[in-house]
Image (spheres, rainbow, N blue to C red):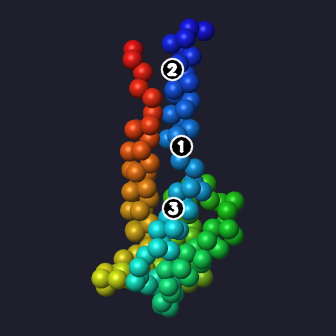
């Protein structure tokens, strides 16, 4: 095979590995972000919980439903959005008093995580002259 073709195929293979961020890493990043929320309260079924308790609860739900969860979006929909018992949506009350649905927050965080991964990937991918 021509060296140029081998080089292009190698680059495409490398790029596909880097750009296909594993769901587990994204979910771990979401859980870490939740746990690190300073002064926030997680509201589940009308009861307030600490950010650490919320992280532990969502992690437990993830473990129980691991076979169904193939992406971070699956995790948000199946674990981070609402109670599987009552169907009531989870909420986060931030330190500043702002109250938001947890799935909306998790989707925003996921976008930010992916932007950061793509930005760092763009800087590390090799640039080859034609």
Q: Earlier in the sequence, mark 3 or mark 2?
A: 2
Quadrant for residue 6, please give it.
top right
Check the image and report above or below for 116 versus 78. Answer: above
Label 3 neighbourhood size at 10 Å, few (<14), some (14-19), many (20+)? some
Q: Position of residue 27 (x, y in %)?
A: 55, 61
- Front residue of this view, candidates 20 and 39: 39
- Residue name at image x 68 percent, y 68 percent: 63
Sequence-wise first label, 2 or 1:
2
Q: Residues within 10 Å of mark 2 (few under 14, many from 20)?
A: few
Asked which secondary structure carries label 3, the reply is: helix
Q: Which residue is mark 3?
A: 29
Nearer the camera: disc 3 or disc 1: 3
Task: Pick whichever, 62 or 112, lies toward us.
Answer: 112
On screen, residue 123 above or below 130 = below
Residues at marks 2 and 1, CA–CA distance in whole angstroms: 18 Å
The residue indicated by pointer 1 is 20
Q: Residues within 10 Å of mark 1 (few under 14, many from 20)?
A: few
Q: Answer whether residue 40 is visible to the viewer in this image.
A: yes
Query: How much space separates mark 3 and mark 2, taking CA atoms?
Result: 32 Å
**Residue 8 numbered tag:** 2
Q: Secondary structure at mark 1?
A: loop
Q: Position of residue 99 (x, y in %)?
A: 34, 81
């Amino acid at each position: 095979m021509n060296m140029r073709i081998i080089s292009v195929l190698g680059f495409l293979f490398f790029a596909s590995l880097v750009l296909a961020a594993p769901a587990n890493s994204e979910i771990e990043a979401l859980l870490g972000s939740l746990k690190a929320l300073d002064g926030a309260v997680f509201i589940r079924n009308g009861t307030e919980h600490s950010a650490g308790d919320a992280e532990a609860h969502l992690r437990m739900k993830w473990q129980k439903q691991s076979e169904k969860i193939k992406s971070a979006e699956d995790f948000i929909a199946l674990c981070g959005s609402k109670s599987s018992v009552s169907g009531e949506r989870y909420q986060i009350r931030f330190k500043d008093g702002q109250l938001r649905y947890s799935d909306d927050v998790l989707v925003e965080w996921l976008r930010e995580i992916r932007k950061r991964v793509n930005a760092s990937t763009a800087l590390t991918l090799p640039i080859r002259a034609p």
